[in-house]
Image: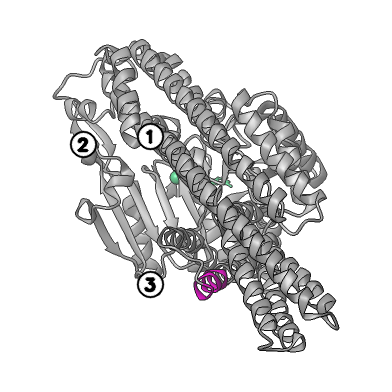
Amino acid sequence: MEPLASQFEAEAERYHQWRTTLSRAVHEYHDWLERTNQLDVQQSIRFYDLLETLNKGRLLLVFLAEFSRGKSELINALFFSSFKERLLPSDVGRTTMCPTEIFHDPNEEPYLKLLSVETRYRDESIAQLKNMPVEWSRIRLNVDDPKQMRQALSALADTKRVYALDARMMGLIPMFDEGTALKEDDVVEVPAWRYAIINYPHPLLTNGLSVLDTPGLNALGLEPELTLSMVPNAHAILFLLGIDTGVTKSDLEIWDRYVRQGLPAKIAVLNKIDLMSDALKSESEIRSGIQRMTESTSAQLGVPTEKVFAISAREALVGRIKEDQSQVEHSGIERLENYLASEIIPIKQQLLAKAVTSEIGGMMTSSHKSLIGKQQQLQAQIKELSALQGQSQDMVAQLWEHVTQEREQYNAALAEYKMQRMAFSHKKKVVLDTVDPTRLDLLCARSLQAINDSWTTPGLTRGMRELIRLIGDEFDQMKLAGEDTRRLMEGVYDTFRGRFGFVALEFLPLDFEGPRAKLALLALQTEQFCRDPINILMTEKRFMVRKFWRQLIEESRVIFHQARTNTMRWLTDVPLPLETQIRDHKVQLELRLASLQKLKQRDGSIHDELNKINAQWLDAQRQITLITGLIRQVRDGWPSPEGVAAEVRVAAETDAIIPKPQQEYLDTVRMTATARADAGVPFNPAPR
Ligand SMILES: Nc1nc2c(ncn2[C@@H]2O[C@H](COP(=O)(O)OP(=O)(O)O)[C@@H](O)[C@H]2O)c(=O)[nH]1
Ligand SMILES: [Mg+2]
């Protein structure tokens, strides 16, 4: 392996280790719950899903730019230089034509899979087509044979000739039609493939990184799935510019439309700095020229200069192939790699940690609290029994009487709780009804009416605004129903705390900030799509409008589903800690009574009973240590104070351009992170 990429690789390896440790902690917690009979089927499924997320958890880095900025060359330099070849096609006139996803799935042999462009005739999304193996041409990649690899990967640049009519039917025309009136039987050249997937064992990819290489602006607009789903959900976007062209109008268009307002981390790369070399200039003159370009790029994109990387992808690739370290250093690629290592991987780490805490954080906190509660009760019992030592038998009988009464009161409270539990179930059903997937179908149907069968951009705007409004209303209703439920349970908690000394618990409100932020972004993208002159003017664009709409519905479904998952999780979490304590308290009460009963009947000595309780206390202590240890392992994935500072910086940078709901979401993230850093408490569940 190239020593040059070592920091990135070391960081990816560290991340991989961390993920393994985290998975193990989750496993151990699961086993503990199972051992102590605290696991039901629903919770088991949650654990299963969570472990799945932890195992899959890839970090997606998207390479975005106008064509010919050097994306493929940079990917070659970063990932494929050990082949001593230029693997991905990157040449004048022959370059990658389709979006290409690169990752490593160790369960399969290396391959290249290609999706034919004709699938554009159909309605399925790329995500759906990924589950249909017959739609893909699959080529085995022989990693020991660079020539074969290069030959196979050259397919990424394939084009084919089709009739203009077909190109139009596939929605490919705007890329080639630039106002020239093509006749239906004119022949045009289009990309042969719609999408490509490369499975390839590079250490970075094996450790969870995946990369998406995209062709230029026009091709991006052709796949709403890329712009509405894959790019906004990426963890980081690497935006490339050419130092020879600077920030052009179409570069800026891509930036404004797909990068600027999104949540992924943003990195600008000013490529081709080798073009600045000039035999008549000194090295320092050249360097200050590059510095000026970096500053103006930073100003034009609104990205801090330390996030603009001036590099030469070509020099990096050639340097690595020729093992010329000074050329590699000169290329500037190492600074970029170090940045990726130190800034991007931690982002993914935080996201996974957040997934763990939001999935089982509540459960862990409640396990912890209930153990503490149990220990407190044992402590009280020890005190109670110790006080009996040397006292008359009368005192024992009195205490027994007292505890029996307490049990009666407790049973009465439980009967009451049964009623409250029914009320809770009723409210729960109301909340669940609002998040039923058929509700969304209804909303989609209503917004479709707003389009009114006119598949034009104004129709789409109407339909989309309606849909966003309806879903937003729905979230409001869910939140209200959630509040109502929360108040009910809060009352119940207070009763038990006041009357039976339960450990205090805090309630997290049901929140939809995540889904809301995504919805706001979707609205913004639709407005942009509808404002785009190309989409307004061309009548053939009806095709694109429909395609865009379909993707919009798909994304709305994802968002709605996320809100539903949040809600269901919340509904399970709310009564859980209470019911654990209720059960524990009941068991403790019975044990306490049984032990007094024995003493009353002179069946055992106080000393023996005290020993038993002490043993229980120690057992609880051991379990507390175990749970605290697991909590710590999970918590260690949280951002360090520097990480929090970085989050605050990101939020500050994006203040001006982010729509309000999304801003609120970022604020929540920031506040929770800060609170977490400040609080000495073992653990704070994540914002949902
Ligand atoms: N001089 C120079 N040319 C480069 C550099 N990187 C890429 N190129 C050239 O720019 C053209 C487009 O590169 P390519 O990687 O295909 O761009 P893409 O369309 O963004 O993937 C090719 O001819 C590359 O050889 C660089 O760092 N310096
Ligand atoms: Mg390319």
Q: Is residue 481 above or below residue 237?
A: above
Q: State whether label 2 is within 8 Å of ligand 2.
A: no
Q: Kindly identify which residue carries mark 3.
A: 145
Residue 219 falls left or right of residue 113: right
* Residue appearing at x 55%, y 68% in the figure: 23
As helix, strand or loop, the secondary structure at mark 3 comes to loop
Residue 426 on image: x %, y %: 43, 38
Residue 4 appearing in the image: no
Is there CB contact under 8 Å for labels 1 and 3? no
Q: Which mark is residue 348?
A: none
Task: Inspect the magenta stretch and tell me whether residue 32 lies in it.
Answer: yes
Quadrant of the image containing the C terminus: top right
Circle 3 residues within 10 Å: few <14, some 14–19, many ≥20: few
Residue 508 appearing in the image: yes
Q: CA distance from mark 1 to mark 3?
A: 57 Å
Residue 617 on image: x %, y %: 72, 77
Q: Kindly identify which residue carries mark 1.
A: 433
Instruction: For marks 2 and 1, give the one nearer the viewer.
Output: 1
Q: Is residue 531 above or below residue 394?
A: above
Task: Tell me where the magenta segment starts and ends, as one range.
Answer: 27-36
Q: Kindly identify which residue carries mark 2.
A: 122
As helix, strand or loop, the secondary structure at mark 2 comes to loop
Task: Say which label, 1 or 3, has the lower sequence index.
Answer: 3
Task: Say which label, 2 or 3, has the lower sequence index.
Answer: 2
Q: State whether label 1 is within 8 Å of ligand 2.
A: no
Query: What type is the residue that disc 2 sits on?
Result: Arg
Is there CB contact under 8 Å for labels 2 and 1? no
